[in-house]
Amino acid sequence: MAARPRKNLRKRPKRIHGIKAEAKPKIESKAEYPRWGAVDEPVGNEPALEAVPDTEPKTEYPRWGAVDEPVGNKAKFDATPETESKTEYPRWGAVDEPDATEAEKDPNIIESYEIENLMSGINIRLDTVKQEHAYEVVEPKLTETEEETLRFVKETLVMTLDMDLEGLERKEAYLEELFERIMKNYELKIDDPKKILYYLKRDFLGYGPIDVFMKDGLLEDISCNGNGVPIYVFHKNYEGMRTNVVFDEMELDSFVIKLAQKCGKHISIADPMLDASFPDGSRLQATYSKEITAGGSSFTIRKFREIPFTPLDLVKYGTFSAKIAAFYWLMVENGKNMVIAGGTASGKTTTTNAVSLFIPPTSKIVTIEDTREISLPHENWIKSITRLGMGGEVASGGGKGGEIDMYELLKAALRQRPEYIIVGEIRGKEAMVAFQAMTTGHIVYTTVHAESTATVIHRLESQPINIPRMLIQAMDVVSVQAQVKTGGKKQRRIIEITEVLGMDPETKEMRINSVFRYDEAGGYVYSGRSYMIERIAQSKGMTIRAMENEWNDRAGVIEWFIEQGVDNYVDFANAIVKYYKNKESVMREVKNSRRIGHSG
C-alpha cells in the first residue's frame, strides 16, 4: 500500500455538517478520545497519521480483547500474511468464504457461530490442558495502517462531534455519514472501510470490548473480576467459560465509568459502588478502582431477555412438565397467590414471568421491581421500578433523599386497584405490604431466596422480613426451583410444589401438602392430591373428578401448543386468549389433532 502524502492532513480546516475538520489532526494526549475504543494508547504527543508499509512485522490484532492474544493455555488464532487480501481478517468478515471453516482448521474448536452481519463471531474452544471450554471473540483483524486510521478517525470524531449520538434516532446512519465525510475530507484510503466502521459502531454506539457479549443471545451473565483477569461469561449451553478479553488497570477504570454513563449513573472514588440498569433492561453491578475491591474495578452484567420464555419453552427445556404448567394455569386463572423460591440463578424470575403469561388479557397488572426483568404482552399493565436516592442520607429513614423503594411502590400499587401484583423479590418491609395485599383479595406473585418450602416459611418469619404466621397462611402455593445435575450438566428444575393449607389452630404449625416433587430418575412425581384443585372445584360447583379432567385437558392443550410450534410469548398469549374466548373449539382441535396423530 502506497504511503499517503502528509499534505493531505494539512489542508485548511473545512466546516462539514455535524463535524469540524481540524487542520492538524494530531493526538495531543491520550485522554482526548475514549479509552475504551482506543486501539493503541498514544504516549505524549503522537505525530499525525502516516501510512505504514504492509511488510512491517506488526501484530494484526486490536489490543482490546485481541483475538490473537492467548489466555492461559489457549491456543492462538493463526496469523495470516497481509499479502493475502481476502483472509486478512476472520471469515466472519471475509468477502469470500475460505474453503475450510475455522472449526475444520482447529479440531479444538467445538462450535462457531456468527453474531452480527458476519463481522464478528464466537469460537467455543476446548482447552485440552485444563479440560474446560473457552469462549473466544472473533472480530475483524486490522493491519497496522488500518489501526492508525481507526485511531485517527476516532480522535477526529471525539474532538469535533457536536452532539450525543446515543440520543439520535438514526445514530448508525449518522455515524456512517460522518465517517464517510472524514475519509473524504482527509483523503484517507483503506482497502476495507467496513472494518473501520465496525469498530466505530462498536465503540461509539455499542458496549466497546464487550459489545459481542451483549449481542450474544446465548449468554446470561458477564463478569469482570478485576484488571489483568479474563472476563468470564455464563453460556446457556456451556455454562461458565473464560474468554479472551482482558483489561489493564487504566482501561478497566475508564470502561467502568463508561458503563455507568450508559446507565445514566455516576461512579467514582467517592461513591465506588453502583447498581443500575442499561437501557435494554440488563442489570449492572460495578465497583470502581481499588476502593472496595482489591483487584481493581469490577463489573457484573446480568443480561435482560427482551423476549421472555413461555411456559412452553420451560416444558421443552424440562424445567417443569406439561401437567405442572397446567397446574400453574389453573392457579393463575383462579386467583391463587404464589411464591416462587430458589437460590441465585435458579431461574425464579424466568418462571415467574412465564407463569404470568397465563394472566387473562384484560386483567390489570402492576409489577414492582428493582430493575426491569418482567416482560408481558398485556396492555393493562403498570411497570413500577424503584429509584435510588441522591445526596446525603435523610434522618427519618436512613435512605438518601428522593429514594423510592419497593415498600413505597407497593403501597402506591394498592391504590391503583390492580387484580394481579407481581413483586420482583421480597427482602424486607415490603413483604408485609405484599402479604397484607394477599389477605385483602389481591393476587400476588413474588420470589424469595430459599431452597425449600420450610426455608421459605422460616425466612418470612425471621429478620428482616418478620411476617406473622397468621399472614403467611395467605400464600397458597410455594414453588421451589434449583439447578440440578442431569446428564453431567446443570439444568434448572422445579424441585417441589407445595400448597399452604393454613395454620393448625392447636399447634400453630403451618399445614402443607406436597403436590409435585422432582425425581431425577422418574421426572416429576405427582403426590395424587391437590387441595387447591379441590377448592377450585368447590368454588366452581364442579366435582373433583371433573376438575381433574379439566386439569388433564389443559395439560393436553399445553402439549398441543408445543406440537403446533407456538414459540414466542406473543403467539402464546394469543393462543391463551383464543382458549379463553372459545374453549370448546380449541379442545376440538386438540382432540382431532391427537386422534389423527395416533391413527397415523
Image (spheres, rainbow, N blue to C red):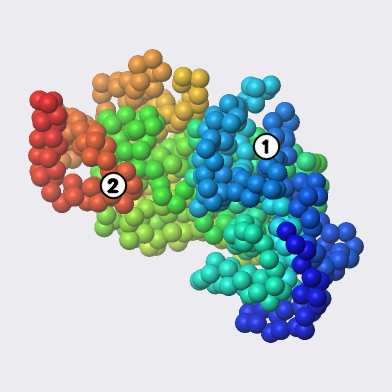
Above or below, 420 against 552 in this view is below
| Residue 456 makes an appearance in the image | no
**Badge 2 local density, few (<14 within 10 Å), some, or many (20+)?**
many
Percent position of residue 182, x then y? 67, 73
Mark 1: few, some, or many residues within 10 Å (few <14, many ≥20)?
Answer: few
Amino acid identity at mark 2: Phe
| Lower sequence index among marks 2 and 1 | 1
Secondary element at image label 2: helix
Residue 338 found in image quarter: top left
Q: Residue at x 50, y 53 (%)?
A: 117
Q: How many marks?
A: 2
Secondary structure, mark 1, is: loop
Q: Position of residue 82 (x, y in %)?
A: 70, 48
Residue 341 located left or right of residue 538: right
- Quadrant of res 73: top right
Is 212 on the left or on the right of 380, as rendered? right
- In the rendered structure, the answer to whether residue 292 lies left or right of residue 333 reads right
Q: CA distance from mark 2 to mark 1?
A: 46 Å
Query: Which residue lies under the disc numbered 2?
Result: 572
Residue 522 is situated, as x and y percent measured from the top left of the image, at: 35, 16
Instruction: Work out which quarter of the rendered image holds the C terminus and state it.
Output: top left
Residue 584 seen in this snapshot: yes
Name the amino acid, label 1: Asp
The vertical placement of 456 against 200, above or below, is above
Q: Residue furthest right?
A: 44
Residue under circle 1? 78
